[in-house]
Image (cartoon, helix red, strand yellow):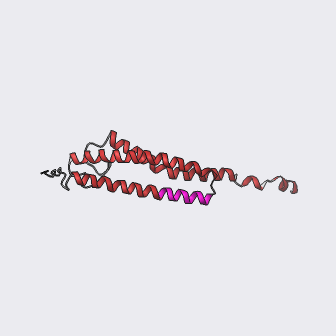
């Protein structure tokens, strides 16, 4: 009985801390990079292959942009341009930030990832507000083009 207990290695039951740290770092990198990559992907879809008709399932939905077919197509094009550009820039910047995760302590890495996610959220919200304002400037709430001001 004593020989069986001496052969049992309890240390083998514990996870390798290097692997756990690697998984934690990977989870933070995925969390930080998912938003920009999705933003870039949706932006390219809206730019290159937008939904043809206004719908409640797919596309950038904004009530001004859903009022007419022309407003819908314009909204998708603007959303595609803004989201593609922002997604490309954020992907590059966040990839550089994620490169510094390698030497960080887990709590510092968590704080850095949280700040990155907050910055992404603010920038995406600002982009959505900008898209809405651009569409509102060109179309009225019924989907008609606004009249251009007459220059004197």
In the displayed structure image, the side of residue 140 where residue 41 appears, left or right: right
Bounds of the magenta segment: 106-117
Based on the displayed image, in which of its 4 quarters is residue 10 positioned?
Answer: bottom right
Residue 109 part of the magenta segment: yes
In the displayed structure image, the side of residue 5 where residue 17 appears, left or right: left
Question: Quick check: 96 above or below 116?
Answer: above
**Residue at position x 21%, y 45% in the image:** 70
**Residue at position x 48%, y 49% in the image:** 34
Judge whether residue 42 can be spotted in this image. Answer: no
- In depth, the one of 97 and 75 nearer the eye is 97
- In depth, the one of 103 and 149 nearer the eye is 149
Question: Quick check: 107 above or below 58?
Answer: below
- Quarter placement of the N terminus: bottom right
**Residue at position x 36%, y 53% in the image:** 127
**Count of numbered circles on the image:** 0
In the displayed structure image, the side of residue 39 where residue 114 appears, left or right: right
**Residue at position x 26%, y 52% in the image:** 135
Residue 90 is situated, as x and y percent measured from the top left of the image, at: 45, 49
Residue 116 part of the magenta segment: yes
Judge whether residue 75 can be spotted in this image. Answer: yes
Residue 83 is situated, as x and y percent measured from the top left of the image, at: 37, 48
- Residue lying at the far right of the rendered structure: 2
Residue 128 is situated, as x and y percent measured from the top left of the image, at: 34, 54
């Amino acid at each position: 009985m004593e020989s069986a207990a001496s052969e049992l290695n309890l240390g083998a039951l514990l996870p390798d801390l290097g692997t756990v740290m690697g998984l934690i770092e990977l989870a933070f990198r995925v969390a930080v990079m998912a938003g920009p990559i999705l933003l870039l992907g949706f932006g390219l879809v809206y730019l290159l292959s937008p939904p043809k008709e206004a719908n409640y399932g797919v596309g950038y939905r904004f009530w001004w942009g859903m009022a007419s077919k022309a407003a819908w197509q314009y909204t998708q094009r603007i959303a595609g341009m803004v989201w593609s550009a922002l997604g490309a820039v954020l992907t590059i910047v966040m990839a550089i930030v994620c490169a510094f995760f390698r030497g960080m302590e887990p709590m510092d890495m968590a704080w850095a990832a949280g700040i990155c996610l907050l910055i992404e959220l603010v920038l995406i919200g600002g982009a959505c507000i900008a898209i809405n304002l651009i569409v509102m400037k060109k179309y009225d709430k019924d989907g008609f083009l606004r009249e251009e001001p007459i220059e004197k």
